[in-house]
Amino acid sequence: MSKLRIATTSLAGCFGCHMSFLDMDERLVEFLEHVEFDRSPLNDIKNCGPCDIGLVEGGLCNGDNVHVLREFRANCRVLIAVGACAINGGVPAMRNHFDLSACLEESYLNGIGVENPQIPYDAELPLLLDKVHPIHEVVRVDYYLPGCPPSPEEFMSVLGDLLEGREPVLPKKLLHYD
Ligand code: SF4
């Protein structure tokens, strides 16, 4: 049986969803007998190629996030929004209550302990979006894996279903949003 190819990325995420994925611990060994990784923070592949599954952690807070998300959607047969941030913006979307300029000024000009105050500007830096967005506002999403982060058991349940060719059904006992 050929292996399923999986890509993963963290957009405006904290990498906690990836850490929870790795919390499968020794169960990862058996998992890796059935899957191989495309672009992921876990390896050095720079661009996402054709894949079976894309796992997207984090919402969208800058232009680079949007670019990467579109790359994933174009290449992944099944795209999964992983965690609260990808699903509804999560905690980073709390900045949506403020003007972006106020956030930048507080962080880089007026914040406690700021030295040499200046707002970073360089063409290499991705431009921040005015608001943080969930990923479904930009691309079609096939499945949502809730939690902040989803538990390793949730990853195993959904990925196990997809590996077996079944429609993923998350058991109620694994469903949580915190
Ligand atoms: S959902 Fe939670 S754990 Fe996952 S990236 Fe967002 S803040 Fe981190």
Image (spheres, rainbow, N blue to C red):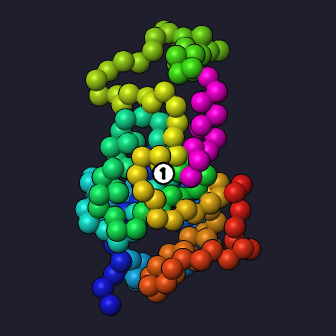
Horizontal placement of 104 versus 46: left or right?
A: right
Q: Type of residue at label 1?
A: His
Q: Is there any visible trace of residue 29 in the rendered image?
A: no
Residue 79 x %, y %: 42, 63
Characterize the magenta stretch by its predominant secondary structure.
helix
The residue under the point 40% across, 82% down is 34
The answer to whether 79 is drawn above or below residue 11 in the figure is below
Horizontal placement of 42 versus 168: left or right?
A: left
Residue 177 x %, y %: 69, 57
Magenta highlight on residue 95: yes
Task: Classify 10 Å Cα crowding around label 1: few (below 14), some (14-19), many (20 and above).
Answer: some
Residue 109 x %, y %: 54, 11
The answer to whether 172 is drawn above or below residue 95 in the figure is below
Quadrant, the N terminus: bottom left
Magenta highlight on residue 45: no
The residue under the point 40% across, 68% down is 78
| Residue farthest along the bottom direction in this orientation | 1
The magenta region covers: 87-98
Tag 1 residue: 136
For label 1, the SS is: helix
Quadrant, the C terminus: bottom right
Q: Is there any visible trace of residue 133 in the rendered image?
A: yes
The answer to whether 34 is drawn above or below residue 67 in the figure is below
Horizontal placement of 148 versus 158: left or right?
A: right
The residue under the point 72% across, 74% down is 172
Residue 102 x %, y %: 57, 16
